[in-house]
């Protein structure tokens, strides 16, 4: 999505717009888990306190529980379209900004 199409998702010739709604502010997630069931893809977004991560040593906690924020289920076709849109958005962002320090 370019700046002029912010909030829009294009599929073929159809363009869907999301109206701004102050009740639906973005929610920050710093972890994601992807699973599949039959023909569906389920993406769980969660949050782990960065302070907790900074204090842990690898040998202390082999498994960390994240607070689940939301789980999204979509068809394989929609997941592929989402992946392409996400890749395009990341590529546009990297043109304008330095790569993420984690890379």
Image (cartoon, rainbow, N blue to C red):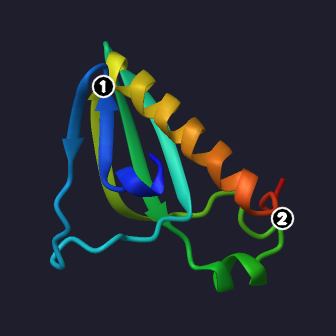
Q: Is residue 63 left or right of residue 85?
A: right
Residue 74, how many percent across, how many down? Answer: 28, 30
At x 30%, y 25%, the residue is 11
Distance (Cα) linking label 2 and label 1: 32 Å
Relative height, residue 75 to residue 31 (above, below) = above
Instruction: State the residue position of label 1.
Output: 11
Residue 37 is situated, as x and y percent measured from the top left of the image, at 34, 21
- Near-viewer residue (101 or 11): 11
* In-image side of 31 versus 67 (left or right): right
Asked if 80 appears above or below 29 in the picture, the reply is above
Residue 40 is left or right of residue 66, and the answer is left
Q: Secondary structure at mark 1?
A: strand
- Residue lying at 57% horizontally and 79% vertically, measured from the top left: 49
- Checking the image for residue 101, the label placed there is 2
Give the image location of residue 31, x and y in percent. Answer: 55, 58
Residue name at image x 76 percent, y 81 percent = 54
Instruction: Name, please, the residue furthest toward the front.
Output: 4
Of badges 2 and 1, nearer the viewer stands 1
């Amino acid at each position: 999505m370019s700046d002029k199409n912010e909030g829009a998702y294009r599929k073929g010739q159809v363009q869907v717009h999301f109206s701004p709604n102050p009740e639906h502010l973005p929610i920050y997630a710093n972890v994601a888990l992807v699973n599949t069931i039959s023909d569906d893809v389920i993406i769980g977004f969660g949050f782990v306190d960065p302070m907790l991560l900074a204090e842990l040593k690898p040998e202390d906690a082999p498994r960390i529980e994240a607070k689940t924020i939301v789980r999204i289920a979509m068809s394989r076709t929609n997941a592929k379209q989402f992946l392409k849109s996400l890749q395009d958005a990341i590529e546009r962002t990297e043109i304008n900004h330095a790569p993420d320090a984690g890379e």
